Image: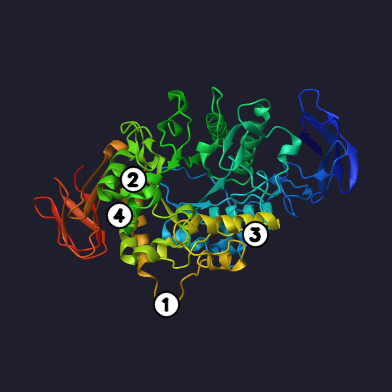
Amino acid sequence: MLFEVWAPWAQHVSLHLSGRPVAMARDEGRAGWWLAEEEAPPGARYGFALDDGPVLPDPRARRLPEGPERPGAVTDPGAFPWRHAWAGRGLPGAVLYELHIGTFTGEGTFDAAVERLGHLAALGVTHVELMPVCPFPGRHGWGYDGVAPWAVHEPYGGPEGLARFVDAAHGHGLGVVLDVVHNHLGPSGNRLPEFGPYFTDGHHTPWGSAVNLDAEGSDEVRAYFIGSALAFLRDFRLDGLRLDAVHALIDDRAEHMLAELSAAVDALSGELGRPLFLIAESDRNDPRTTAPRKANGQGLHAQWNDDFHHALHCAMTGEGQGYYADFARAPLETLAKVLSDGFFHDGGYSAFRGRRHGRPLDRETTPAHRLVGYAQTHDQIGNRALGDRMTALAGEERAALAAALVLCGPFTPMLFMGEEWGATTPWQYFTDHQDPELAEAVRSGRRREFGAHGWTEEEIPDPQDPATRNRSCLAWPGGPREPWLLGWHRRLIAIRHEHLPPDLPLADVRAEADEGAGWLVVHSGPLTVAVNFSREEAATARLGEGGFEPLAGTHRCPPPGRSGGLELPPQSATVLRRASV
């Protein structure tokens, strides 16, 4: 077996295999690389010592059975006995479902989550989107402080557990998307800086020194993260990756790392003969993120659309603090603009930022599925002081209105685990840092952050308290009667699959709202959604010309009148099919 490691600063490197040191030789063909050929059975522990220093885990270790700061274990990624053939499932026409393995079930493992996959398949979901599963110190956490981008968190079930989960998902016809973090590593257990220039002080991010994507040595750093992405897609038969906070991938080179990554993923897709896709989380509202590389874009296949979430959240709750301020002045008109144009911030002034922000998308060339729309995500719930969900903030009736716009609107829809039945469990920020100083810094920092907004110290959940994680575990519904919201979500998803074209261009989307009357209508090709947000007053929404057939509604509504008006009771939504488009 060939052991290899990139350590350009080291004068000599030794492999420690099952406690036995072996001197490694320089690779004459690759600067900074060290090699050793040794027999090693599966499970054998190994690590590397640089210049007679301590034994460090392999930066490319595929399994870290004792945690990210201990030696890795030899494993064969190609040895898993896959049961289900999988031709892949692309992004157009997808319905995503974001879940966190550690709280999707009380057990918090891949194998426990497998038992719930039938529920998702029956709901009509097409892809499960897993929050990060790379190793981090401790047992419980969100996963965004991972420190080993090639491995899988052992308490969840390790790499074999992930493979079993993906295989079971495929057996239900579900694709799997994995959230990966390339913009930083966690604050504890990160040993990469000891191996080489993985980080640079030439740029800084909210997490400190930036990942080195453009300075000396950055060729190997880029290859490290791109290689990790390709390995997960190939070896675990994933369908796509969600890339965390790509605006923090600071890269001044002529070819941005994201364009290099998307080219590599497209090439792997051709090699494997199945569709693969990348979804960005981006704060920039930059059309280049999803524009094709041949048009000087970065070639990512979609991006999360926070503008849609923010406008919808303001319409649902009436909140207007912080970054919601830009959307709260006229939330229905803002929401109509987002539905029609893709972005709200497309070059206009943002009071929250104190400057102009974003650029407009090209409606004629942008497919609507390149934007992911959602009412709730781990961020938008968990970054609240108490982790309260939409149902806690606005009630089930308004959650049903949001579902109609998410699931029968133009964008690729995404649900957050439990949203489909109106889960009442909060989703709170929890950690399990093993370093006492870091644990206290996180605890006090969260209390200080929310204390500035009027919360008392006693009200803010302690991230380190196991009870905070336990409160965030889903309480699955039981009993003979299913929650009415669950049936509503299932019906909406079925309508989407039956009637909405997967390749709908943004140019075929049109939305109109009346802020004073409280109604909004969005036409997405053949589907129309009409919503009355008013809590007390009925409204007459303008549908426009053409015949409309009602498909589903939260309330009974009379059929549209000849003038194109639709009478909507308070807090109601109706989904219709247009007879002519």
Q: Which residue is mark 3?
A: 432
Confirm or deny contact between disc 4 and disc 1 (CB under 8 A).
Answer: no
Image position, residue 389 (x, y; %): 42, 62
In the rendered image, which quarter contains the N terminus? top right
Q: Which mark is residue 315?
A: 4
The amino acid type found where label 4 is placed reads Ala
For residue 249, side relative to residue 543 (left or right): right
Badge 2 or badge 4: first in the primary sequence: 4
Cα separation between marks 4 and 3: 36 Å
Q: Residues within 10 Å of mark 3 (few under 14, many from 20)?
A: some
Cα separation between marks 2 and 1: 44 Å
Cα separation between marks 2 and 4: 12 Å
Q: Which mark is residue 326?
A: 2
Q: Which mark is residue 480?
A: 1
Image position, residue 330 (x, y; %): 26, 48
Q: Secondary structure at mark 3?
A: loop
Q: Secondary structure at mark 1?
A: loop
Residue 154 seen in the current view: no
Badge 3 or badge 2: first in the primary sequence: 2
Name the foreground residue: 135 vs 380: 380
318 vs 395: above or below? above
Q: Identify the residue at image location x=48%, y=52%.
A: 379
The amino acid type found where label 1 is placed reads Pro
Badge 4 or badge 3: first in the primary sequence: 4
In the rendered image, which quarter contains the C terminus? top left
Name the foreground residue: 14 vs 27: 14
Image position, residue 183 (x, y; %): 58, 40
Cα separation between marks 3 and 2: 35 Å
Q: Identify the residue at image location x=33%, y=53%.
A: 314
